[in-house]
Image: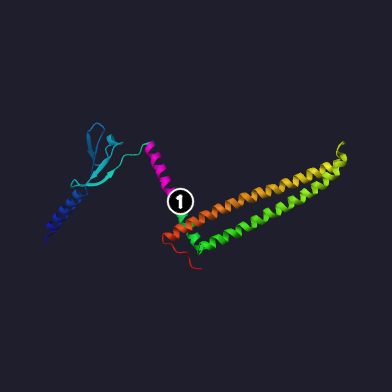
Amino acid sequence: MAPELRVLAFVCAWLLTTAAEAQLFVCTDAKGRTYSGDRPPPECGERQVRELRGDGSVRRVIEPPLTPEQKATRAAEEKRQKEEAERKRETMRKDLALLEAYANELEIEETRNRALASRMAMVERAKNRIEEHQRERKKVDQEAEFYSKRELPERLKRSYQLIDSLVRSEEKIIVNATADMNRVNERFDNDLKRFRELVNAGAQPVNR
């Protein structure tokens, strides 16, 4: 090919490429007026802008900047979605741990009973100690009868105070242990219910 023809072919190809790559930004303002240019028109700073190719087809759509209210709404939705995803991951983690911990419902009940046994023993010990303190109090009561018409000696007053304090301490142990047993039962009730749901849905406990 002659040099002149090669130059002409190159120029034509460059012009075609340039035309294909040409871009035009078009938008319509709030009053319906259309603006266009080789860059996004400033008149449509708050409006949607279309970027057109050289052949008139739409290359992309540039959305207007979000208002403060829209930004707040989007941020709230992103936060909600993130929290929901985290909740699902946590649920999956707990479900897997449950299937790894127990082979069947019987194991759940056996574990529950072991957890309750230590609390029940604590309550029983506290009750026995209260009975001991009450026996000590009866002895003090018998001695205090000699002072029915006189003021009690400080020694007896301190004995009553000590016994009352010890009884209150044991009663507090019983209240706390009972509340703890309620929490244990609630936790194992939930575990049993969820284990049942998973197995009924087709999940298999992990072989151990």
Residue drawn 67% across the image and 56% down it: 121
Q: How is the image coloured?
A: rainbow
Residue drawn 40% across the image and 39% down it: 72
- In the displayed orientation, state which residue is furthest to the top: 31
Main SS, magenta region, reads helix
Nearer to me, 185 or 135: 135
- In the displayed orientation, state which residue is furthest to the bottom: 208
In the displayed structure image, the side of residue 183 where residue 81 appears, left or right = left
In the displayed structure image, the side of residue 10 where residue 125 appears, left or right = right
In this rendering, the count of numbered labels is 1
Q: Secondary structure at mark 1?
A: helix
Range drawn in magenta: 69-86
In the rendered image, the vertical position of residue 3 relative to residue 77, given as above or below: below
- Which percent across, then down, holds residue 129? 74, 52
- Which percent across, then down, holds residue 207? 48, 68
In the displayed structure image, the side of residue 15 where residue 61 appears, left or right = right
Nearer to me, 32 or 202: 202
| Amino acid at pointer 1 | Arg
The residue that label 1 is drawn on is: 87
Check if residue 80 falls in the magenta segment. Answer: yes
In the rendered image, the vertical position of residue 59 relative to residue 96, given as above or below: above
**Which class describes the residues within 10 Å of circle 1: few (<14), some (14-19), or many (20+)?**
few
In the rendered image, the vertical position of residue 30 relative to residue 136, given as above or below: above
- Which percent across, then down, holds residue 138? 80, 47
